[in-house]
């Protein structure tokens, strides 16, 4: 079934989910949420993609949240179902064994902010404007933002973001820890592609084990987390591919210490 609100591309082991609603802003409508979830599932099972990128590039927005025209007609049951749909997408992103990079090319509002929070890494253009303005509309997010944002930036910043409903620029987002890197708009996409392709060169199995263990760290005690790490570490010795990488290092054919970042 063809996609209506996005397209998928795979280049150099990176799978790209390109939000392109055909309108000025990428709204997280019911159709869009379902399509992004389907795209995540499709790329999760595609061995050609080692790392995933979600973006609204080259448009003006990453995602601006839910379609207000749809939400204005919601009753309580509709709101609950819509929240469950969004949460199921973000759970799929976190369960995906592949790193998911949010490339925040521009305006990122409400549910779009939650979509970014579900990514493993967030790279922003200096054109970024990010906010959770729901309180101004008489609502809050239903997509886990009140739970994920404090875990990422701390409760004080989370309170400020939700309670003021004010927009923040890229520099503020970087200072708060809401994004990991900021690049000038003119070189943003080039830098995103280079970053994603560096990750895509890494062992897919090691990436999957690292993601699983790091995500579990939020929800389990240290002893349990360390046991999970040890089991994940041991698992990687069971595959000839991973042992081959160590052999290449010992033979001097692989450089694991150099950085390609610029």
Image (cartoon, rainbow, N blue to C red):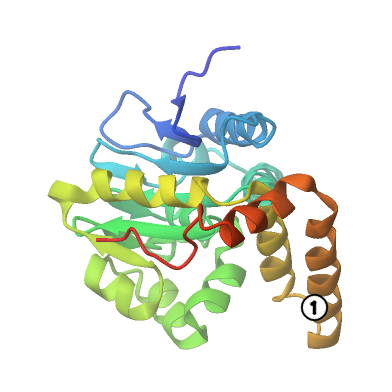
In front here: 95 or 243? 243
Work out which quarter of the rendered image holds the C terminus and state it.
Answer: bottom left
In front here: 153 or 73? 153
Q: Would you identify the image quadrant in which residue 230 lies?
A: bottom right
Q: Residue at 45% across / 26% down in the picture?
A: 9
Q: Residue at 43% across / 65% down in the picture?
A: 135
- Where does the image place residue 90, in percent across and percent down from the top left? 62, 50
- Where does the image place residue 82, in percent across and percent down from the top left? 63, 43
Instruction: Look at the image and tell me whether residue 246 can be seen.
Output: yes
Quick check: 144 above or below 164? above
- Where does the image place residue 241, in percent across and percent down from the top left? 72, 45
Residue farthest along the front direction in this orientation: 251
Q: Is 188 on the left or on the right of 149, as rendered? A: left
Tag 1 secondary structure: helix
Q: Residue at 45% across / 68% down in the picture?
A: 257
- Where does the image place residue 225, in percent across and percent down from the top left? 80, 78
Instruction: Look at the image and tell me whether residue 95 can be seen.
Output: no
Count of marks placed on residues: 1
Q: Is 77 on the left or on the right of 61, as rendered? A: right
Residue wearing tag 1: 225
Q: Residues within 10 Å of mark 1 (few under 14, many from 20)?
A: some
């Amino acid at each position: 079934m063809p996609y209506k609100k996005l397209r998928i591309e795979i280049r150099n082991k990176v799978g790209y989910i390109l939000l392109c609603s055909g309108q000025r802003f990428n709204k997280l409508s019911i159709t869009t949420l379902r399509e992004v979830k389907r795209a995540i599932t499709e790329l999760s099972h595609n061995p050609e993609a080692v790392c995933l990128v979600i973006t609204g590039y080259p448009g003006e927005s990453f995602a601006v949240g839910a379609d207000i025209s749809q939400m204005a007609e919601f009753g309580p049951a509709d709101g609950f179902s819509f929240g469950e749909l969004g949460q199921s997408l973000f759970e799929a992103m976190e369960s995906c064994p592949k790193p998911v990079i949010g490339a925040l090319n521009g305006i990122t509002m409400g549910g779009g902010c939650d979509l970014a929070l579900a990514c493993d890494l967030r790279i922003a253009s200096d054109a970024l404007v990010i906010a959770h303005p729901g309180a101004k509309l008489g609502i809050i997010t239903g997509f886990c933002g009140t739970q994920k944002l404090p875990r990422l930036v701390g409760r004080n910043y989370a309170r400020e973001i939700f309670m003021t409903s004010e927009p923040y620029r890229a520099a503020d987002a970087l200072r708060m820890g809401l994004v990991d890197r900021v690049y000038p708009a003119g070189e943003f996409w080039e830098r995103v592609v280079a970053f994603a392709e560096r990750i895509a060169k890494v062992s897919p199995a090691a990436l999957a084990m690292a993601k699983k263990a790091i995500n579990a760290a939020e929800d389990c005690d240290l002893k349990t987390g360390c046991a999970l790490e040890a089991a994940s570490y041991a698992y990687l010795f069971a595959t000839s591919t991973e042992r081959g990488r160590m052999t290449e290092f010992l033979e001097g054919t692989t450089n694991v210490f150099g950085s390609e970042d610029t």
